[in-house]
Amino acid sequence: MKTLVLGGTGFLSGALVRHLLREGHAVTIVTRGTIPPDPACESIAADRSDATVLAAAVAGRRFDAVYDMIAYEPEASKAAARIFRGSIGRFIHCSTISVYMVSRDVQCPITEDQAHAPLMEHWPRNPFGMDYGIKKRQCEETLWNHHDSRLFPVSILRPTFISGPADPAKRDWFWIKRLLDGRPLLIPGSGDYAFQQAYVDDVARMFVRLLTCPESIGKAYNVAAEEVFSFREYLDMLSALLGRKPACAHLRQEEFDRLPISSSHEGDVFPFNVRRTAVFSLDQIKQDLGYRSTPWKVWMQETIRWWSAPGRGDGYGWSNREEEVRIATQLLDTKVTG
């Protein structure tokens, strides 16, 4: 098939391109050119956020499928619907489970029909991204309003935390590096809330799989690992893979949130502290797409090897590591003497 990927050089979109090429599809990507594209695909240099530029870049061309991996504003989805209507076989949008996690209430396991539950009050510390989730909801709503099974057939995937080697969010690396240095871990809250990751290659495979499943037209799917862990279980399993037995100090969430180290302008720190249970139903993607996830230990060992190689950098928040250790040590000492 002739496929167009809006994006194509990022963490997930790059994996998608590799899987499409591996399956024999002809791949064209639209990219600003800041990251070198895969030489096996055609590359169009254009700014996807400029609707006029994007329309000119693809004018007169037809594709069997278009993947929109970088729509973060409803205006971008509206422009894509206008540009590609009547000239494609499929339009596949990358969304996120954050569309659920900005809701006031969800029922676990969270099913695809819960994407439009009433919003919670604005919560700046929402670990799933408050504004991000709202904007992605609006993108979805725009696409469903333009969905037409013949002229603009839409399918949507909603991944959870996408993880694996080279993850630019560096979530696993945050904890791997701290476990490797052997000093105490500072853990916000109880660590009891459950969550799911998603291995990047599993997500990419499902994006490709949509092409061969016409029953997926007009549907949205959750995609996550089948394995569910609490935050503490995640740390215990990661510690076991690394051969570490760290001392762990818990700090009440309210107290932790007041610490300067609880956030960083660099990126996500203390990741996977989800603050509410986030478990997603995979019944629909298993039924329609035959989904099975790669075992966590398999891809996590690969991830550890990648991040443990020289030159990977410190990760987000590492400059505050000494303060973390000081607070954790003080909590542990208080527990012993208390």
Image (tube, rainbow, N blue to C red):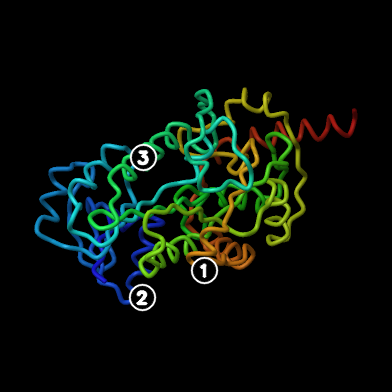
Q: Which mark is residue 23?
A: 2
Mark 1–mark 3 distance (CA, rounded to whole Å): 26 Å
Q: Nearer the viewer, mark 2 or mark 1?
A: 1
Is residue 256 placed above or below 163 in the rendered structure? above
Q: Nearer the viewer, mark 3 or mark 2?
A: 3
Q: Which mark is residue 290?
A: 1
Q: Where, by quadrant of the figure, is residue 88 drawn?
A: bottom left
Question: Could you say which is closer to the camera, residue 199 or residue 186?
Answer: 199
Identified by mark 2, the residue type is Glu
Question: Could you say which is closer to the camera, residue 28 or residue 264?
Answer: 28
Q: Where, by quadrant of the figure, is residue 301 drawn?
A: bottom right
Is residue 45 placed above or below 145 in the rendered structure? below
Is residue 305 placed above or below 102 in the rendered structure? below
Q: Where, by quadrant of the figure, is residue 14 drawn?
A: bottom left
SS at mark 1 in the image:
loop
Percent x, y of residue 116 = 47, 37
Q: Identify the residue at image location x=17%, y=58%.
A: 87
